[in-house]
């Protein structure tokens, strides 16, 4: 510790404060990582749902035999999914 303080030109008390600050930063980063992990998981789930709905709508459209109203409804649904 003495060698580190001499080479850094700081006092032992300052090193202690720096250590506490670094611990606080590490805790904040860990919390941010947990939070972002949850958000990413939620977004992945939403993306899978949108992908499933889009695939279903495209399948219905590709099968054909739809009335004009059904096709328009599917087209609206596809556009809503794409622009969501």
Image: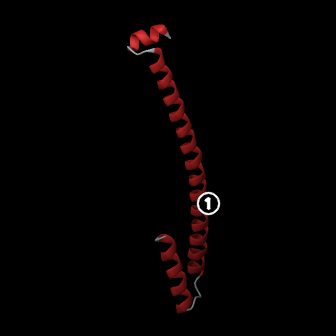
Check disc 1 and report its element: helix, strand or loop.
helix
Q: Quadrant of residue 10?
A: top left
Could you say where residue 15 lies in the image, as x and y percent from the top left? 47, 19
What is the total number of numbered labels drawn onto the structure image? 1
Residue pictured at 58% horizontal, 70% vertical: 55
Residue where numbered disc 1 is placed: 45
Work out which residue is located at the far front of the displayed protein and give it. 13
Residue pictured at 51% horizontal, 24% vertical: 19
Judged left or right of residue 18, residue 34 is right
* Residue 43 or residue 14, whichever sits in front: 14
Residue pictured at 57% horizontal, 43% vertical: 31
Could you say where residue 58 lies in the image, as x and y percent from the top left? 56, 75
* Residue 50 or residue 74, whichever sits in front: 50
* Residue 58 or residue 51, whichever sits in front: 51
* Classed neighbour count for the residue bearing mark 1: other residues with Cα under 10 Å, few (<14), some (14–19), many (≥20): few
Could you say where residue 76 lies in the image, as x and y percent from the top left? 50, 81
Judged left or right of residue 71, residue 4 is left
Q: Is residue 16 above or below residue 46?
A: above
Q: How is the image coloured?
A: secondary structure
């Amino acid at each position: 510790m003495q060698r580190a303080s001499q080479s850094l030109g700081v006092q032992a008390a300052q090193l202690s404060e720096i250590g506490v600050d670094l611990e606080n930063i590490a805790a904040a980063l860990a919390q941010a990582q947990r939070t972002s992990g949850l958000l990413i998981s939620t977004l992945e789930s939403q993306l899978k749902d949108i992908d499933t709905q889009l695939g279903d709508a495209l399948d219905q459209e590709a099968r054909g035999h739809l009335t004009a109203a059904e096709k328009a409804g599917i087209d609206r649904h596809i556009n809503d999914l794409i622009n969501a």
